[in-house]
Amino acid sequence: MDDVECLSFAEQLALQGRALPGQIERVRAGSLFYRERLDPAAPLAEQPFVTKAELLAAQAQDPPLGPLAGVAQDEIVRLHVTSGTTGTPLLIGFTRGDLERSSLAGARAFRSAGVTPHDTILHCVNYAFYAGGIADHMSLEATGATVVPVGLGQSDRLLDLIPSLRPTGMFSITSYANHLAERAVAKGLDPAGLGLLTLVTGGEPGGDIPELRGRIEATWGARVADTYGLGEVWPTLGAQCEARDGFHLSTPDLLVAELVDPETDRVLEWAPGATGELVYTHLEREASPLVRLRSRDRAEVLDLDCPCGRGQPRIRLLGRVDDMIVVRGVNVFPSAIERLLAEAVPAMRGFAVVLDEPVPVPPIPIAIEADEVPEGLDRMIRERLQVQVAITALPPGTMASSEQKTKRIWRRYAGEDPGW
């Protein structure tokens, strides 16, 4: 790991404190959007938050980046869009320096997840438009590993070429690892016999859930570790370490992360057990700098003293604030439901929460694809999460396997039809 990752958390915070004033000045000098918002004399906690909706509105004034741009157009060498999983995609610019820093952040994360210079990694992520494609490819190369740019839509061809490529690892969204295993079995191949030793996942929940991770490991005969990133912040900015319980952010010199109470906006202390929304401020970003972006990702602090030697807090992602379901005053995250289901239904192939009303009324419908659902599962969920649910078991094959991200919430009241 890099020396900066080994600094104590207090030393990392001091480093960030020294770097932040200069970045605030650079952002104000380059970006009209921030020049009008930021007070150079105020501490970070007193600067205004920014939301993705505000960034989209500013961008729309003068595309591609409008007043958000921190540098002149001729310094921007690449444009990406965010995945748009929560709405309209946001355009993101990169200077050459931004690309170098993106690769640095991602390489640290991938090394934490187990990628080494001796690996040949299958990069099975969408390359089209999204920052996570080519940017993560560059990060993987920065680890020293050999990278095979597979992308999506090549599953059968990939399985044919594995004997020649002789890969030792793969990077993909969690559901693609299951999809590729199913394609292998359909071709008469044993996934565990294909030689992969390391599977790095990201982009959706699952790889951070021990029961689901264990099933993928049993299928492939490989070690699984999960990563975390946001296209508008850094495409990959955190990963599990050897503990594989929560994530370390790999950006102590590139990003300030605050933990904020999403209801009161109060900045919380980084302490084990603290729970809040992650708010991000770039320390070194030129084309698309961010100051106090509300990520909508909710996290819990697990540890400030990890045995792996990294000084960054180890955090567990609890889910997106946007995806949180409020049922009669109780906050419920789909990721919490998934953890319980994975624990109770070892053969679960998929699940989804189905909402028929904007304000959910219990019992909340949950569909599970599994051969059988244990008796009392609805009671266990009610006892653990304080929400009443109605569980429907679906036969195998109902939730079609796909290379794309798995949808966990279906809002039928908004016209979304799962087709079951």
Image (cartoon, helix red, strand yellow):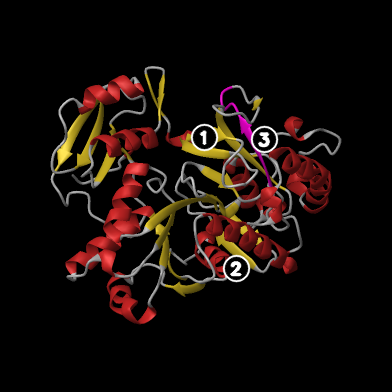
- Are discs 1 and 2 less than 8 Å apart at CB? no
Position of 105 relative to 330 (above/below): below
Quadrant in the picture for the N terminus: bottom right
Q: Is residue 136 left or right of residue 336?
A: right
- Dot 3 lies on which element? loop
Image position of 129 (left or right of 19): left
Quadrant in the rendering for residue 377: top left
Q: Residues within 10 Å of mark 2 (few under 14, many from 20)?
A: many
Q: Position of residue 83 (x, y in %)?
A: 48, 54
CA distance for labels 3 and 2: 33 Å
Quadrant of residue 139 within the rendered picture: bottom right
| Disc assigned to residue 377 | none
Residue beneath disc 2: 142
Tell me where residue 221 sits by quadrant: bottom left
Q: CA distance from mark 1 to mark 2?
A: 29 Å
Spatial distance from mark 1 to mark 3, Cα to Cα?
Answer: 16 Å
Q: Position of residue 124 (x, y in %)?
A: 41, 66
Which SS type dominates the magenta stretch? strand
Q: Earlier in the sequence, mark 3 or mark 2?
A: 3
Residue shown at 73% from the left, 46% from the top: 33
Q: Which residue is mark 3?
A: 49
Percent x, y for residue 210?
36, 43
Whether 75 is drawn above or below 302: the answer is: below
| Amino acid identity at mark 3 | Phe
Verify whether residue 292 appears in magenta: no
As drawn, the residue found furthest toward the right would be 41
